[in-house]
Each structure stands twice: as structure tokens, then as C-alpha cells.
Image (cartoon, rainbow, N blue to C red):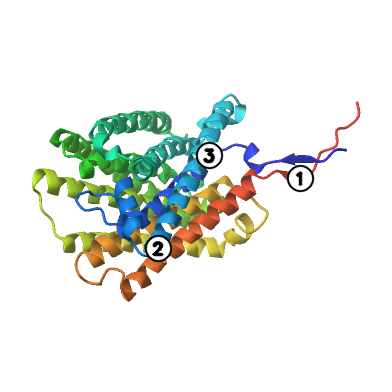
Amino acid sequence: MADIYKKPADQYSPLYFLASLGAGGVTVSFFMFLMFWVPHPGRPVPIFEDVAAAFATGGTALQAAIIIAYIGIAVFAVLNVKSLLWNLSALSAFKKTESYQKLRNSNAESTLMAQPLALAMTVNAMFIVGLVFVPGLWTVVEYLFPLAMIAFAAIAWLAFSILADFLGRVLSKGGLFDVTAHNSFAQLLPAFAISMIAVGFSAPAAMSHSPATVGVSLIASTLLGVAAIIYTLLASATAFTSMLQHGTAREAAPTLMIIVPIVTVLGIMLLRQNHGLHTTFEAHGTDADTMILLARLLAIQVTFLGLGLLVLRRQNYFADFVTGIKTSPGSYALVCPAVALSVMIHFFVNKGMVATGMIDKFGTAYWAVTALALISQAIAILLVLRLNSQHFTRQKVEAKAVPAE
């Protein structure tokens, strides 16, 4: 009998969109090197010309950081798009199966929200790629902002269409939602998707010089951001009640840390909004206000990170699903908190501690705290590489004997 080899990912789940999401998140984490280490006077973000000037005049350490950032952005942006395209194709085939119909009539219907989540992340990642790889892009950026908002509006329409089908089904009649299977934070995936679209919508608020563009960006991102917060509060409260009664669903345990990326993207949304209010509408805040806001957000993240790691350790999750031989598409949810924590620490250090004068930029204290961001980023990279190897490498499976007629 011939050996049979299959990839675990051949048994498709919409949660595999998280593979694309994770790669996109790592792309953003490498952009932080350029965002906070490359001078970009007069602009809220660094562009190709800023990086080129810094590379030409900077020291060896800065040049090395720029090279690492460019390689990281390029590699993981390609991986992000490659994974997204694979998922779109696999989802199209999956929709023709009986398994898809079963999914649409279960709690797992909400996993379809991973698609707009990944799409929104890819748009954000491609904007970063454009900034750092395309010379002269900033000269036409005002024309790109309306196009970007149209793209995010289309993704929002897709997300709310999926969510409307799910909530319309479970809320219109009783007994269609299995409360006993609600014992994780898996149902916060819609909130994560909406928050990712919100942060994309908020970008023009921080970067545009057009009051109309900034205004639309502020309003749209606020509507989506508030919706994400409300959904997060409701879904997490009901899920926690179920977890107290039934324990945490083992394969969904990584979702306990989904609050971490939700807080990061909503935090960046708030920073972008505040910048737009300051530069366009003369609403002035202080660096101290920003630092305490980021500190509070970071405190929320540390709380849920600790909770998630506690449960994962008690359930021996890593030994089975990360370093072991078992596979679960939900494992990709582990990448998001690591990326999100890394990005949040970068913002806290630079927009909070440095901006207020609490520490000196590039001093000993600066690198001591920034090291935590770099460690978290390294964990995210290792998780992406390990999980991709687990799920997308063909493995030998036991062939079942077919009985003779």
C-alpha cells in the first residue's frame, strides 16, 4: 500500500486566515524600527526618502536596523499576501462542501470573520510597503487616502454582512447558539475584525491635510471603533461566564489573549485620531495624556496576557499544539498577541516615556524596555515559522484499508 501524505491545512478552516494576519502583523512590527528610529520631520510616518537619507548619514547600528527592517517587511509582506490568496482560494472551495453548511449553522460561523480581518490587515501592510519601498509616494498620498477608505468600506460591508447572518440567525430564535461551547474568547473574532477595519479607516486622520478627508476618517473610524468595543464587552462577559461553568475549550484557549491585539489596534486608532484632531481641528492634548493612555492600555494587555498564558500552561497547550505533533488552526491566534504587545511597547516607549522626557531616547532605560518589544517580536516570528511548518508541510498519514467486496 502506497504511503499517503497530506498537509494538516488540507482540512480547511477559516481560521487559517489568521496565518495571513500573523504575517501581516510581523510586517508592521518591522516597520516600528523605521517609525521610531528613522527621523521623519514634518511627517507622521517615515517614507522612502526619509529612510534613504537616514541610511546615507546614519551610523552602522542604524544602517543595520534599516536593512533588517526592509528584509523583514519584504519577506513577511510576501508571506502575508501569499497566505491571503491561498485562503481565498481554499475558502471558495470550502463553501461547496457539507462542512461549510455545518459551520454556517454552528457557533463556528463567526470564524468567517477571519476573512475581513485578514483583508484589512493586508491593506494596512500594503500601505506600509508603499511608504518604504515606493519613491515619491507621499506626493500623491492625498489621492490614495480616499481609495484606501473605499477599500476599507468594502471590507466593512463584507464583515457586517457575515456578522448580520450570524447574529440574525442566533438572535432571531432561541436555541441556535450553543452556550456550553461559548467557553473561550473565540466569539471576539468579529470585534477584532471590526477594530482592524477601524484602525485602517483612522490612518488618513493622522496623515491627510484635507479637512474633509480627516473628518470622514475620524467619523468612520469612531463608528467602527465604538462598535468593536461594545461587541468586545458583550462577548467577553458572556464567554467568561461559560468558562467559569465549563472550563476553557482547549483548542480555543489561545483566544483568551485576543484582547491584546484588539487593544493595540484600537489604541493606534485613538493615537491617529488625536493627531488628526490636533493638526487639523486644533484640539490639543499633551504628551502626558498620551503616556497615561498607553499605560492603561498596556495594563489591560498584560492582564489578559497573564490570564491566557496561565490557562495555556495548565492545559499543556504549547507541548501539544506548538512544539508537539498535534495541530489546530486556532494556534495561529498565538501570533497576534505577541505582535500586538511588541507594537504597543514601541508606542509606549516612544510616544509616552520619551515624549514626556521620562527617559532619554536611545539611552540605557530606552533599550531595556525596547528589548521587551524585540523579544515579543522574535516570539511572533518563531511562531509564524513553526506553525507554517506544522500546518503546510505534508505529513505521512495512516492509510485505511478498504474491505474487499
Question: Would you identify the image quadrant in which residue 135 lies?
Answer: top left
Image height check: is 62 above or below 219? below
- Viewer-nearest of labels 1 and 2? 2
Q: Position of residue 403 (x, y in %)?
A: 88, 32
Image height check: is 78 above or below 341? above
> Tags 1 and 2 in contact by the CB under 8 Å rule?
no
Residue on which the image places disc 3: 83
Amino acid at pointer 2:
Ala
Calculate the distance from the C-alpha at mark 2 to the C-alpha at mark 3: 25 Å
In front of the other: 384 or 18 = 384
Position of residue 379 in the picture relative to residue 165 (left or right): right
Query: Who comes first in sequence, dot 1 or dot 2?
Result: 2
Query: Who comes first in sequence, dot 1 or dot 3?
Result: 3
- 10 Å neighbourhood of mark 3: few (<14), some, or many (≥20)? many
Residue on which the image places disc 1: 396
Amino acid at pointer 3:
Ser
Residue on which the image places disc 2: 373
Calculate the distance from the C-alpha at mark 1 to the C-alpha at mark 3: 23 Å
Query: Who comes first in sequence, dot 2 or dot 3?
Result: 3
Position of residue 26 in the picture relative to residue 388 (left or right): left
> Tags 1 and 3 in contact by the CB under 8 Å rule?
no
Looking at the rendered structure, the secondary structure element under dot 2 is helix
In front of the other: 74 or 87 = 74
Calculate the distance from the C-alpha at mark 1 to the C-alpha at mark 2: 38 Å
Is residue 257 shown to the viewer in this render?
no
Looking at the rendered structure, the secondary structure element under dot 3 is helix
